[in-house]
Amino acid sequence: MNGHLRRHTLTRKLTGALRAAQTRTDFSEIAVSSSRPHYPHQELTHTIIGGIYGVYGGLGAGLLESVYANALSVRLRRLGLDVAREVPFTVVFDGVEVGHYRADLVCNNAVLVEVKAGEHLSPNAFHQTLNYLRLSKLGVALLVHFGPRLSFQRLAR
């Protein structure tokens, strides 16, 4: 059998199999599962990420962290979120207050947003945000880098 005839026979067999599959009405063997895992505050973080893209699309790269944080708070409020800026948290060690830090944004009292800007994201930024998340006792944080390329990481406790 030559190559052309072999291909034609194979094509006819596949076409027949496709027709049979298209006419089948019993879908009981088909299992449907969601490939997207569920995360805490998934809808809220989705809205925040949309706001992040909006800010980056409108302002681009090269501005100060405070400008991006202010713009993001404006955008998120317009999207209907409750946004607090520069939220203070206390660091306690062995029962003694040893320091303070301020979260850039906290949305709906549930998601901490840490904003970074500049050419490169410091390797320490991830660990810093993870510590902020732990100390804040919130469940989710977003580390956002408004750099030459927008990037963000979602952290959960």
Image (cartoon, grey):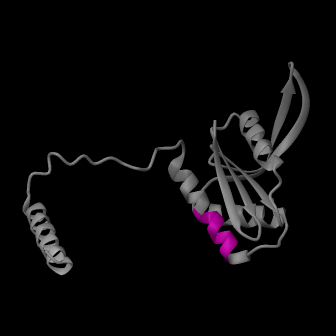
Residue 64 in the image: state x and y as whole percent: 85, 67
Q: Quadrant of residue 83?
A: bottom right
Query: 99 or 33: nearer the eye?
Result: 33
**Eyeballing the image, is 61 above or below 93?**
below
Q: Is 2 situated left or right of 130 in this image? A: left
Residue 124 seen anywhere in this rendered image of the structure: yes
> Which range of residues does the magenta coloring cover?
50-57
Q: Residue furthest bottom?
A: 4
Q: Indicate whether residue 104 is drawn in magenta.
A: no
Residue lying at 69% horizontally and 66% vertically, measured from the top left: 150
Query: 59 or 76: nearer the eye?
Result: 59
Q: Residue furthest front?
A: 1
Residue 36 in the image: state x and y as whole percent: 44, 50
Q: Is 106 situated left or right of 125 in this image? A: left
Dominant SS type (magenta): helix
**Eyeballing the image, is 58 above or below 48?**
below
Residue 41 in the image: state x and y as whole percent: 54, 45
Q: Is 12 situated left or right of 64 in this image? A: left
- The N terminus sits in image quarter: bottom left
Residue lying at 14% horizontally and 51% vertically, measured from the top left: 27
Residue lying at 70% horizontally and 61% vertically, measured from the top left: 73
Q: Residue furthest top?
A: 94
Residue 109 seen anywhere in this rendered image of the structure: no
Numbered disc total = 0
- The C terminus sits in image quarter: top right
